[in-house]
Amino acid sequence: MKNRAVLFAALLLLGISPALASECPLDMGKIDAALAGNPSLSAAELAKVTELRSQGEASHNAGDHGGAVEALREAMAILGI
């Protein structure tokens, strides 16, 4: 029974991975658009968003789409999008 649960979880993650992969570029675009609009952020917040955006892109390019989505969502939260 435990093996089935582990197998199910693994298959579920494999099925979600392509969806996350296509979501990353959309999220990066949203962040870029928000940054182009000169958001009212502190210097520290702007630096954090820029760092998270870069981290998200690097994770996406490395195939770590879960990590990419996590970083990009954090950046979007700071931007309020």
Image: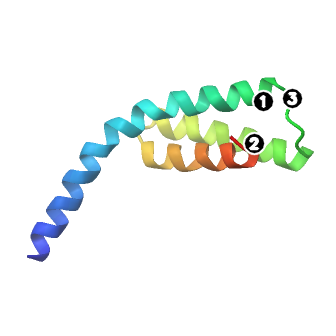
Q: Residue at the spot x=36%, y=37% of the render?
A: 19
Q: Amino acid at mark 3?
A: Asn
Query: Residue 58, position in %: x, y?
Result: 55, 36
Which quadrant of the view contains residue 2? Answer: bottom left
Marks 2 & 1, CB-CB < 8 Å contact: yes
The amino acid on which the numbered mark 1 sits, given as a three-letter code, is Leu
Q: Position of residue 28 (x, y in %)?
A: 60, 31
Which color mode does the image show? rainbow
Asked whether, in this view, residue 41 is left or right of residue 50, the answer is right
Which is more toward the observer, 54 or 33? 33
Say which amino acid is labelled 2.
Leu
Q: Which mark is residue 79?
A: 2
> Which quarter of the image is occupied by the C terminus?
top right
The part of the image, by quadrant, that contains residue 15 is top left
Residue occupying the point 53% across, 28% down: 26
Mark 2–mark 1 distance (CA, rounded to whole Å)? 8 Å
**Residue 74 placement (x, y as % from top left):** 64, 50
At label 3, counting other C-alpha atoms closer than 10 Å, the crowd grade (few under 14, some 14-19, many 20 or more) is few
The quarter of the picture where the N terminus appears is bottom left
Judge the density around disc 1: few (<14), some (14-19), many (≥20) Cα neighbours within 10 Å: some
**Of 53 and 29, the residue lying toward us:** 29
Residue under pointer 3? 38
Q: Secondary structure at mark 3?
A: loop
Disc 3 from disc 1: Cα separation: 5 Å
Q: Please give the residue where the numbered disc 1 appears in the rendered image.
A: 35
Crowding at label 2, few (<14), some or many (≥20) Cα neighbours within 10 Å? some
- Residue furthest bottom in the image: 1
Q: Name which quarter of the figure residue 55 lies in.
A: top right
Q: Decide which of tag 2 and tag 1 comes sooner along the chain.
A: 1
